[in-house]
Amino acid sequence: MRRYGKHTDEDDIRSRPNRKGTRPRTNIRPAHEDAAEGMVLTVDRGRLTCLVEDRTVLAMKARELGRKAAVVGDRVALVGDLSGRKDTLARIVRIEERSSLLRRTADDDDPYERVVVANADQLAIVTALADPEPRPRLIDRCLVAAFDGGLTPLLVLTKSDLAPPDKLLELYGDLDIPYVVTSREELESGGAADRVRAELDGKITAFVGHSGVGKTTLVNALVPEDRRRLTGHVNAVTGRGRHTTTSALALPLDGENGWVIDTPGIRSFGLAHIDPSRVINAFPDLEPGTAGCPRACSHDEPDCALDAWVAEGHADPARLYSLRRLLSTRERTEGD
């Protein structure tokens, strides 16, 4: 006799058979408590190369993750064949919470943001002082994305033998951004790599920059010889570099405790996803002054409370100018 009340048990419930099979219906998913921890090194057409302990494993995303994508730098949980042998495939069943996220959009009108790197500690913005010419507004856009995503920016200036760095460094002096200046001779001798490596030790650093600025060349000087990537040349007519890096790739530092993530060259950096309230977190001397700002203040309007905050001597006017210059980069102009 069937009993339908408060104290039913499994014998009282009849599970209807599935028309497409005999498997009973259930929403319960395995917890995968025995899953191994790994880090995503690169993504190639749905196949993810992950580092599990001391070996690389090819994996795919599990169906239960849905549309959530794993990106380079993600910490993931894997099950299945973790041997790393040829023709084996593991499954990524869980993506751990991200500590930072570098995002960009194709342009300022594109509502769809693209995740570039996850869990990076700092963003190395690589720009050449000449050949190709530096683009300060592109640098500003990278800085805004770094502040918004929780990454510490690092400015790396290459090809100092072709042009002096003073004029470009003057633009960013009030932002207190660490920087390293290198030349082509120093890259060949190894001196430049040593100075850059001192800023990267113990951290996960993502490298971004325009094509042809020497980004991959610098990364090759920092990683073991057997992990180096191909490099191209700068077109003498257009001043543009060749896209030799087509996907992001995480590489270990040579003899150090740290990682570098080489990314494809960028020619535009959309900021449609940026919220000004997150950017100002990078300015701790100005942030308290926003308490008196009107709702949805852009921090560059007549009623902004930051003007009075600076006038009272709480912060340097140059810092407010730098903040407004960075926020103004969200307004796209010709040449970005």
Image (spheres, rainbow, N blue to C red):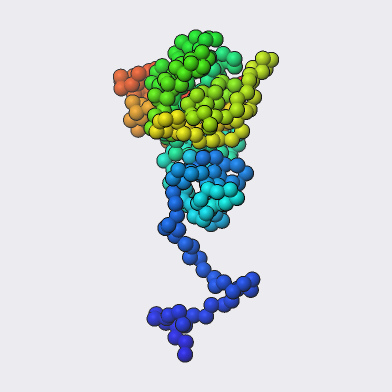
Q: Is residue 34 above or below residue 205?
A: below
In-front residue for pair 109/242:
242
Quarter of image, res 286 = top left
In-front residue for pair 309/75:
75
Q: Is residue 197 above or below residue 115?
A: above
Residue at the limit of the structure toward the right, as seen here: 237
Does residue 327 appear in the picture of this structure? no
* Residue 257: % across, % down: 39, 33
Left or right: where does residue 95 sit relative to residue 234?
left
* Residue 308: % across, % down: 35, 23
In-front residue for pair 68/5:
68
Q: Residue at x 61, y 33 (%)?
A: 246
In-front residue for pair 327/88:
88
Left or right: where does residue 315 sit relative to residue 102?
left
Q: Residue at x 45, y 79 (%)?
A: 10
* Residue 218: % across, % down: 51, 23
- Count the numbered circles shown: 0
* Residue 176: % across, % down: 38, 21
Quarter of image, res 243 = top right
Q: Quadrant of the C terminus?
A: top right
Residue at the limit of the structure toward the left, as seen here: 313
Q: Residue at x 46, y 82 (%)?
A: 11
Does residue 52 appear in the picture of this structure? yes
Residue at the limit of the structure toward the bottom, as seen here: 1
Q: Residue at x 54, y 52 (%)?
A: 90
